Image: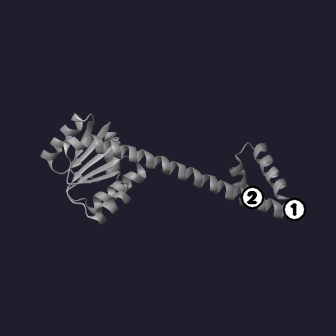
Amino acid sequence: MRVLLVDDDAERAEAVRAGLEGAGFTVAAIVAAPGDLTRLVRESQAEVIVCDIDDPSRDALESMRALYRDEPRPVVVFAGKGQPEQIEAALEAGVAAYVVEGLHPARVRPVLDVAIRRFRAHQSLRAELDAARATLEERVLLDQAKRKLMREMGLTEDAAHRRLRRMAMDRHLKLAVMAAEILRI
């Protein structure tokens, strides 16, 4: 796996790089500050982001939030400080793991493995939620279109559904697209 390493201490970054590579990761890039993480991830094609930061700043957390929104990747923060509010803010920004008291080479692989699994599970849940929302939105559209057909054409619910289905088939449209068109008319 390709890792983007964020560490403002060059000497420590080199030690972390060696630890990551020793654990089987490829360090794609090392940067001193998170800055625009989305751009950095795209340029480096990193699959995982490891931030070794003494005290994550608001800007760093905002960059992580933008990354999570625009280019979701597992982010692991190894921090020197771990105030509850800080940890909560990091998790809300999409951080998959927040480890206090820095990065130790022996812990790198298991922490990253857990973070990657947690990230993938969370992404799977997000996809399921998005699909459920889309299905619900389609259902609402269909019901509204049927009610409109019932009201305007004096149809029963079953007849309105059949009419809607027939219209969609005749125009080679999905049922939800046809329902949206009916509602626009």
Q: Quadrant of the C terminus?
A: bottom right
Name the residue type under label 1. Answer: Gly
Q: Is residue 77 left or right of residue 148?
A: left
Q: Position of residue 144 (x, y in %)?
A: 72, 61
Q: Quadrant of the N terminus?
A: top left
Q: Position of residue 167 (x, y in %)?
A: 79, 48
Inspect this view and state whether residue 25 appears: yes
The residue under the point 35% across, 57% down is 91
Instruction: Give the colour scheme of this rendering.
Output: one colour
The answer to whether the residues at label 2 and label 1 have Cβ atoms under 8 Å apart is: no
Q: How many marks?
A: 2
> Quick one: SS at disc 1?
loop
The residue under the point 54% across, 53% down is 129
> Quick one: SS at disc 2?
helix
Circle 1 residue: 154
Inspect this view and state whether residue 185 appears: no
Q: Position of residue 174 (x, y in %)?
A: 70, 46
Q: Is residue 168 left or right of residue 2?
A: right
Circle 2 residue: 145
